[in-house]
Image (cartoon, rainbow, N blue to C red):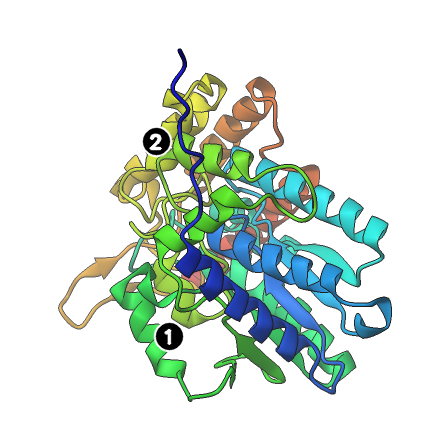
Amino acid sequence: MAIARPTPKIDPALEIKVDELRSVIRDEYLQPHNHPWIIGFSGGKDSTLVTHLVFEMLVSLSPHERRREVHLVSNDTLVESPLVISHIDNVQRDISHAANAWRLPIKVVTTRPDPEATFWVNLIGRGYPPPNRSFRWCTDRMKIQPTSRYILSQAASSGEVILLLGVRRSESSTRAATVAKYDNGRRLHKHNDLQGCLVFRPIVELSTDEVWEYLAFHQPPWGGTHGALFKLYLDAGAAECPAVMSQDDTPSCGTSSSRFGCWTCTVVEKDKSLSGFVEAGFAEFQPLVEFRDWLASIRDVPERRMARRRNGKLTVTSEGVFIPGPFTLDTRREILERVLELQNILPLPVINQEEIARIREVWAEDASQAAAWSAAAAE
């Protein structure tokens, strides 16, 4: 005789807590102004929960109450972890289809770095060494600037925007300090860097366990399940790289608190998430792991670095430490060759033709500048 097992149920206290959050979200949405909402969507658990609750709220409203636009904004650095960007694309597609069916005022947006600011144009074109904790040139150019431009454009056209972030006090001591810094006793606070942008953190007081528990017991209102999200974390053994909207968020990008993001990230000592994906059965991504490790290994090899910085100056610190310049042109050529080899063997785009063209233009500009410096030195 089979033994009936009790059906797992969500903690009633958590349901009450989330019901209160729903009320807060609804009340804020129905405030007597039309400033659009912008959700910073990284595809991870926290931004997924915020999106889940906002979508539910919109469905619960009558059509005439849905007067405020909601922009679901993700960022693609063009070197995102392949499975992560695929997951984000899938969720965006599902949300867009469901929003259209329900006639919800949701706009799905993906921001990308300016062609001059991509990872490959800076690394291979200009010869920037791979980022590390003391020279993390990537986050601002590839994450903050593209999304900030979008937010500011919306603020300029509407007067003000409200940015919804899935930040939580219990994420880490660093996050708790950042949250406390902006606590003003009100629901909204001004963004530190973006004029005309107010920040709303609806799930700030939830714990990590509460986020996972709620997602496990509630299917997304746009259809399907959150199963792909759970599997993504399980396969990577990691947390998501957060939605980075300001310099205050930068320390959490490429650290132990954000263990998957760009597959090229050399800020971390070891990319545990990409290796986790390979160990979980995605062996086709092993070449990415090997390339990333090779890139980190050549960063500080003296023979691969030029003596002068890109402005033509030698740099020596006050302690007498010489700081080398960018990669040599030979090293940049070698990196490009290896990237093109990856492009040929992998079932995903690694670098685009626009980037390759701009890289070659930068090389030509550098050669012309070097010739001018040599001529000046000879006079």
Residue ID at (42%, 88%): 184
Q: CA distance from mark 2 to mark 1?
A: 37 Å
> Looking at the rendering, in which quadrant would you find the C terminus?
bottom left
- One can see residue 229 in this view: yes
Give the residue pinned by disc 2: 294
Residue 349 image position (x, y, % from top left): 62, 31
Residue ID at (76%, 81%): 34
Q: Is residue 134 above or below residue 3?
A: below
Find the residue positioned furthest to the top: 1
Q: Which kind of residue does numbered mark 1 sit on?
A: Val
> Looking at the rendering, in which quadrant would you find the N terminus?
top left
Give the residue pinned by disc 1: 179
Residue 124 image position (x, y, % from top left): 50, 43
Q: Which kind of residue does numbered mark 2 sit on?
A: Trp
Residue 272 image position (x, y, % from top left): 32, 35
Residue 259 image position (x, y, % from top left): 36, 45
Q: Secondary structure at mark 2?
A: helix
Viewer-closest of 342 and 283: 283
Viewer-closest of 131 and 314: 131
Residue 210 left/right relative to 55 = left
- Indicate the quadrant where residue 111 lies: bottom right
- Indicate the quadrant where residue 291 lies: top left
